[in-house]
Image (spheres, rainbow, N blue to C red):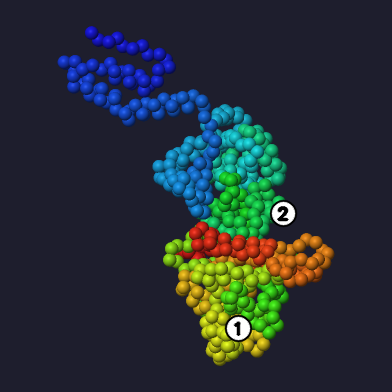
Amino acid sequence: MKDAMPVLSAGTGLHETLALLTSQLRPDANHKEDMVFLRDVFSERSLSCLMKIHEKLRQYECQSPIPVLHSASSLAEDVAEELQSGPMSVEEKELLHLLMSPHLQALLSVHDTVAQKNFDPVLPPLPDDFDDELDEESVKIVRLVKNREPLGATIRRDEATGAVIVARVMRGGAADRSGLVHVGDELREVNGISIMHKRPDEISQLLSQSQGSITLKIIPAIKEDDKLKESKVYMRALFDYVPLEDKATPCQEAGLPFKCGDILQVVSQDDSTWWQAKRVGDSNLRAGLVPSKQFQERRLAYRLKMGTLQSPKSPKQPAYDQGCEKEDCDCEGYFNGHYIAGLRRSFRLSRKDRRGSSGEASASDPGDSEFVTYEEVTRYQQRPHERPRLVVLIGSLGARINELKQKVIAENPHRYAVAVPYTTRLKKSHEKEGVEYHFVSKQAFEADVQNNKFIEYGEYKENLYGTSIEAIRSVQAKNKMCLVDVQPEALHTLRTAEFKPYVIFVKPRIPESRRRRSASSPGGGEHGRFTEEDVQEMRQSAQQIEQQYGHFVDLALIKEDSSSACSELRSILERLEREIFWVPLGWVRN
């Protein structure tokens, strides 16, 4: 006797129906093989899983889902880049592996393609009052949905025809995500309002004030270019930029503000005057306008010509760190029984900067151009068995970087060292060749000067002193991290792919009070009183270095006291060996 077929309700799931059907398959004498085959097929676990997925998708479809993001792929890339920017835990490594897998990337790409179609709301019927001269196929009605974000497109007036043309589409903006607005399109109406006789600023205001659904009447460009893939060009900004103060920008609201040292991802250089860029680490997915390198240099040159800008290479009187206090001493002194070779302030004020034959400034050095604007950079992490990066310390008046450097080296002389300087003076009884100095004849020293072997050199009390490129290489050959403190001008020589210098600007914490006081010196240690005049000199020294060489600096170390500054410097040196940093592209390019 056969079992009665079960009654199926409207709420019975598809996979449940399949299971019930399978249970009713009973092989008999006539159709035994067919029934066994069907039962095996319907009992297949993968088929049951597919039915469950289908059922879940139908339930999700009934909820009319709306995508939360239109650029999940870009967000995944940003998350991956953020994870790679520092040490990762086990969970973070697993997440990075998932984000980089081709299957997940393909899934996110499909998600973005579907999300950007913008099926809702339904487009209204075409208006009946089209201009007679317009061919019906040449006009398209575009309806976008935006909140308080900008539309993400700029416009211009065609001087020949008077037409309002889409000048650029901002990557990641509402117009770009729609895929319906392109550069070169002619804009005729905004929300049914004709813009034929309106000024560009009136049109921009009309677009910015529109909230929610915005309808555009557009005459498409003759040839619509395919959307370009977002580039991966990274630039370090070497100046501050405030769009609201820039009268030349085509749209101040679309501008991207940034500070000197910010890393920008330039996503479009289609416009030779205005690039589209994002700040690395910024949660805003929409690109903004920034002046291009060529345009920024061009207008700085014009300001220089008109006398409203001081030449960035005009000489200024240097103010450098204080060295040894003894008038008859040319060393940096002793610390915990360790003698540290070096140079005193009197010599520093007279020493000169020279470019070594093998230490020429790299092609990516922003100092090669009269104006500093941007520097193309890439991520870099020191590899095992690779030479340590050179650490360059520059300091303003009162920073006492000699003392700071001595302490760090004395605590770990097997890991850190200085480049031993050369001198023409006679060796003292307690000194050893190659420890305090390399003692050479004046003739040999001058020959090395002629051969550009010194980073910088000078004369003090009729004796010559200098630091050579080979002295740095000698330290690095021992797998030690070399610490040098130099005049900022020497950075032009040291910024090479060989040394990959990490530049630290040390400056004291400058007090705010204007009255005379008795306190510890800003560099740490008791050194008596300092006056308002002293404070002003320290402030001017720091400002001068920042103005002329701030674009070379990787990190500014504010020296509250000797102990905390030393601890911070040690932390920086340790990070250099294990973390990822931004460096000029030319330093790692094969």
Q: Which residue is mark 1?
A: 465
Q: Residue at x 47, y 64 (%)?
A: 589
Q: Nearer the viewer, residue 416 or 346?
A: 416
Q: Secondary structure at mark 1?
A: strand
**Residue at (80%, 69%) from the top-left corner?**
531
Q: Position of residue 213 (x, y in %)?
A: 62, 33
Say which residue label 2 marks: 245
Kindly identify the residue that appears in the image at 59 percent across and 87 percent down: 428
**Quadrant of image for the N terminus:** top left
Residue 399 showing in the rendered view: yes
Closer to the eye: label 1 or 2: 1
Rendering coords of residue 23 (x, y %): 29, 18
Q: Sequence order check: which comes first, mark 1 or mark 2?
A: 2
What is the quadrant of the C terminus in the image?
bottom left
Amino acid type, label 1: Tyr
Indicate the amino acid at tag 2: Glu
Percent across and percent down for residue 512 are 78, 61
